[in-house]
């Protein structure tokens, strides 16, 4: 059907540095109306017009879902990434007009849970900002464990402690504080759901331990956006539209397809939602699959690729687009 | 000018009828002279003025009578309306959606005034004027889903989305084509569709689920489904099968035009913002054969569709008992001339 979600015309209402790496951006609707209601865990895709390039990056909404006068996101500066976070940090100023998507939630709370156990690592704290606000307003039962490198990089740790006091536990890497995961996972009441958002190593660790300790998979939820990785340029033939394109070093395959005027569907642009799944018609080379959507078997089959995060190395690639 | 609501019944003396304008706006579901399942889902966007798609939530001349019939069903069988404990938030989402859409489409009949969490809802056709606190169940006479669906045409299923599946965890179902909320409550998408023939083999439900779990806020979708009903009875539930099942044996060549009704469901799918659930309104439209055949194109096409319908589908839709009688009756209105493309009458 149609590409992506409905768009929202917004203006940047504030830009606030949270610490040396993270900056918070506030958006309001240009027409002065309220923004759409959303649920904790939702993200929006922010369109960045950077000269000739358009970048589309997903960021979790971190404000309270009860207040839709503005949306807020927090962006961690990534000096070796493809430039989206640098663009946000260097170019986005209050008063700037931008376009963002409607909210999409791929990390929603399971409202059946009798208790929500949340584990955050670093900038992975952002979806929990919204989820805790939502739960607190409904008298929900939650507990948040938040690991960060240092106290000064513990973005919003102070806010969370002030709001929720002992329901928030902090762990600092520089003080060798570490979540006692096995003890934590073994001592939860029946009906607890587990949520984890952070670096992929942390997500893997938590999911593995939860499985080993007998947590049913339906009770373990994780947000696993892979940012598209830069890589060597490669050429692609789009069989349906009859176009030849080049994917630059700093560009994702999906972005290159879009730049050629072809609009595949997308939602997350992070390899999890499955919308941009694309069939491979022919190939001579090696796939670099970075998504969490296709199965390992599908990765090995070389018949499908998720162009939002995955790349290719080799002589030729023909896609059904 | 507003809608003139009909006084009519969907039981006992069956006085339900469509006005000539409502016959022309009937959502005839066949775009060609044959029918087979397909994933016939499209964006739920506004359609032409004077059609059932003029507003995204349609209110028509049967509104008041349908709400009275719903109240009768609920009085006899409260289990037609159920909401599992985790679905209350989704109920508020639905209340907001239906109040907003009805007030937007029919300002002469419905008004919603919001002042922060304090909301005032005026429903003039049903004589309701309530002020309540959004999010506080103690300020409404029913739970939020039951409150608003006692005032909205069509059945409503609220589906919780989790584990890559959809779960039938709440609903108001009183105008259904032979399925039971009380039986399906808590089931997932594959479980509640298990009885449907042919479609599983075609992989239709796998694709449909993938589509539905990706429905986005602000981008509802819709599809049409159909069956046939003897007498204009809204409540053709399994619970009341003993009341309507035997009707199917009463069709004769003389009464086909009056008794046999095409029953079309306009099904739409909406992402709910706070709960991240999906609401699935199933809006039922009825038209008797005498009314339908006033449009010659529809008469010709319906004849061909029913005549050529695969046996399994005819059985599943419960047509077997009277199919031959109906086809014979319709055949007299089919001169074999071609029908134009598309759904609408010529």
Image (cartoon, rainbow, N blue to C red):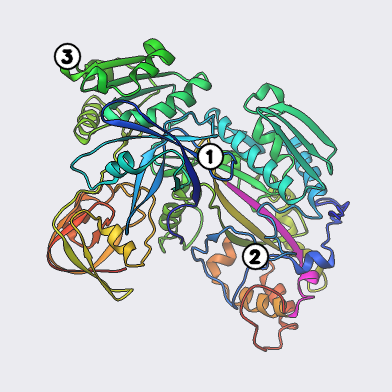
**Number of the label disc, if any, that sits on residue B273:** 1
The residue labelled by disc 3 is A175
Specify the segment rendered in magenta: B280-296
Asked if residue B290 is among those painted magenta in the image, a careful observer would answer yes
The Cα–Cα distance between marks 3 and 2, rounded to whole angstroms, is: 74 Å
Q: Nearer the viewer, residue A79 or A230?
A: A79
Under tag 3, what secondary structure?
Answer: helix
Alpha-carbon neighbours of circle 2 within 10 Å: few (<14), some, or many (≥20)?
some
Q: Quadrant of residue A144?
A: top left
Under tag 1, what secondary structure?
Answer: loop
Answer yes or no: are tags 1 and 3 on the same subunit. Answer: no
Q: Nearer the viewer, residue B183 or A167?
A: A167
Relative vertical location of residue A303 with respect to residue B163 in this rendering, above or below:
below
Q: Position of residue B268 (x, y in %)?
A: 59, 53
Q: Residue at x 29, y 46 (%)?
A: A84
Q: Position of residue B171 (x, y in %)?
A: 61, 40
Q: Position of residue A63 (x, y in %)?
A: 45, 30
Report whether residue A12 is seen: yes
Q: Residue at x 77, y 75 (%)?
A: B293
Alpha-carbon neighbours of circle 3 within 10 Å: few (<14), some, or many (≥20)?
few
Q: Quadrant of residue B324?
A: bottom right
**Number of the label disc, if any, that sits on residue B342:** none
The residue labelled by disc 2 is B319
**Mark closer to the chain start, 2 or 1:** 1
Quarter of the rendering occupied by the C terminus of chain A: bottom left
Q: Is residue B242 left or right of residue A244?
A: right
Q: Residue at x 27, y 55 (%)?
A: A306
């Amino acid at each position: 059907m149609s590409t992506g979600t409905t768009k929202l015309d917004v203006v940047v209402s504030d830009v606030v540095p949270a610490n040396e790496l993270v900056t918070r951006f506030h958006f309001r609707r240009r027409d002065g109306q309220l923004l759409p209601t959303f649920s904790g865990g939702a993200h929006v895709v922010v369109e960045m017009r950077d000269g000739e390039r358009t970048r589309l990056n997903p960021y979790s909404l971190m404000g309270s879902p009860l207040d839709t006068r503005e949306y807020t996101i927090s962006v961690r500066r990534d000096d070796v990434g493809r430039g989206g976070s640098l663009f946000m940090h260097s170019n986005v100023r209050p008063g700037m007009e931008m376009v963002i998507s409607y909210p999409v939630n791929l990390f929603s709370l399971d409202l059946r849970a009798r208790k929500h156990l949340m584990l955050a690592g670093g900038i992975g704290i952002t979806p929990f900002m919204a989820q805790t606000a939502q739960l607190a307003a409904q008298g929900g039962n939650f507990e948040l464990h938040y690991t960060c490198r240092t106290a000064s990089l513990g973005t919003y740790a102070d806010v969370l402690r002030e709001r929720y006091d002992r329901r928030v536990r902090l762990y600092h890497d520089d003080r060798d504080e570490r979540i006692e995961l096995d003890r934590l996972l073994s001592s939860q009441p029946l009906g607890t759901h587990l949520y984890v958002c952070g670096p992929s190593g942390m997500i893997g660790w938590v999911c593995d331990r939860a499985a080993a300790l007998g947590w049913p998979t339906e009770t373990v939820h994780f947000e696993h956006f892979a940012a598209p990785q830069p890589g060597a340029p490669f050429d692609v033939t789009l069989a349906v539209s009859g176009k030849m394109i080049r994917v630059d070093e700093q560009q994702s395959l999906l972005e290159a397809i879009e730049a050629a005027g072809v609009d595949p569907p997308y939602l997350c642009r992070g390899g999890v939602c499955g919308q941009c799944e694309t069939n491979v018609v022919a190939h001579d080379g090696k796939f670099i699959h970075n998504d969490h959507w296709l199965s390992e078997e599908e990765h090995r089959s070389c018949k499908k690729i998720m162009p939002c995060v995955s790349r290719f190395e080799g002589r030729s690639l023909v896609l059904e687009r | 000018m507003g809608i003139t609501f009909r006084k009519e019944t969907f039981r006992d003396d069956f006085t339900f009828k469509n006005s000539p304008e409502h016959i022309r706006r009937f959502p005839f579901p066949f775009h060609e002279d044959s029918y087979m399942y397909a994933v016939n889902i499209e964006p739920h966007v506004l359609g032409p003025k004077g059609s059932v798609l003029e507003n995204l939530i349609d209110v028509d001349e049967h509104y008041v009578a349908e709400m009275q019939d719903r109240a009768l069903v609920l009085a006899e069988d409260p289990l037609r309306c159920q909401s599992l404990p985790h679905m209350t938030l989704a109920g508020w989402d639905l209340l907001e959606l239906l109040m907003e859409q009805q007030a937007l489409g029919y300002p002469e009949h419905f008004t919603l005034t919001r002042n922060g969490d304090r909301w005032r809802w005026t429903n003039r056709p049903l004589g309701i004027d309530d002020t309540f606190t959004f999010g506080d169940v103690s300020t409404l006479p029913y739970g939020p889903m039951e409150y608003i669906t006692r005032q909205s045409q069509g059945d409503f299923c609220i589906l919780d989305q989790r584990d890559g599946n959809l779960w039938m965890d709440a609903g108001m179902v009183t105008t259904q084509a032979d399925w039971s909320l009380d039986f399906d409550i808590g089931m997932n998408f594959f479980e509640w569709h298990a009885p449907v023939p042919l479609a599983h083999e075609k992989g239709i439900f796998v694709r449909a689920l993938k589509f539905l779990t990706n429905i986005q806020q602000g981008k509802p979708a819709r599809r049409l489904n159909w069956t046939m009903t003897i007498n204009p009875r809204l409540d053709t539930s399994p619970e009341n099968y003993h009341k309507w099942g035997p009707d199917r044996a009463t069709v004769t060549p003389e009464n086909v035009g009056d008794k046999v009704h095409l029953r079309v469901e306009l099904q739409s799918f909406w992402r709910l913002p706070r709960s991240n659930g999906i609401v699935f309104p199933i809006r039922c439209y009825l038209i008797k054969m005498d009314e339908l055949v006033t449009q010659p194109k529809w008469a010709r096409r319906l004849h061909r569709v029913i005549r050529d319908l695969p046996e399994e589908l005819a059985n599943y839709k419960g047509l077997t008992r009277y199919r031959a009688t109906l086809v014979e009756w319709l055949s007299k209105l089919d001169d074999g001339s071609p029908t134009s493309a598309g759904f609408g009458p010529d």
